Amino acid sequence: MSTNLNLRHTIVCEDVRIEITRNLSLMGVLHLLHVPQTPVTLFKIAIVNHWRGSGRYRTQVQILTPDRSRSIVVSQASSIEVPEDGGADNVTVFTNVTFPEPGHYVVQTLIDSTLFAETLLPVVVAQQQPTVPASFDAGSDDMIN
């Protein structure tokens, strides 16, 4: 693998917007995904990779199940060009992504069809707190404070 390429960070988020200034605005940055139940389907999920170095490459992103037995989504390969001593961002957007079970999903970034980096995205079923009904006096319809 080329030593001219460095993946500075991978950020998983709900959406990405490219501003008029060409800066990226990230919405809903996900360090872990709390869900009410599984399976769960997300309408949109974006993977942002920030590269440093130089050169032209083909990149691809995929998300594997926690046991790494299968991909739940795989992007089309796309070209990135990192200018000499510069940086480049690559944004991959997936829609209607289903996470079938809780666990640590694996976000993999491939360069020229070879695994370059991976990061984990934990999917956790949120513990539902039982709702405590307001206490009522047995002889009255008035709420007790």
Image (cartoon, rainbow, N blue to C red):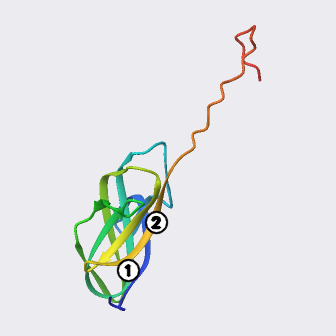
- Give neighbour class at mark 2: few <14, some 14-19, many 20+ (Cα, 10 Å): some
Q: Secondary structure at mark 2?
A: strand
Kind of residue indicated by mark 1: Trp
| Vertical order, 115 against 93 (above or below) | below
The answer to whether one can see residue 18 in this image is: no
The spot of residue 54 in percent (x, y) is 32, 89
- The quadrant of the rendering that contains the N terminus is bottom left
| Towards the viewer: 124 or 132 | 124
Task: Say above or below: 51 vs 140.
Answer: below
Placement of the C terminus among the 4 image quadrants: top right
Residue annotated with mark 2: 120
Q: Which mark, residue 17? A: none
**Is residue 73 something one can see in this rendering?**
yes
Q: How many marks?
A: 2
The residues bearing labels 2 and 1 have C-alpha atoms spaced at a distance of 19 Å
User: Dot 1 corresponds to which residue?
Assistant: 51
Is residue 139 left or right of 17 when viewed as pictured?
right
The residue at 36%/62% (across/down) is 64
Nearest the eye: 51 or 25:
51
Q: Is residue 15 left or right of residue 131?
A: left
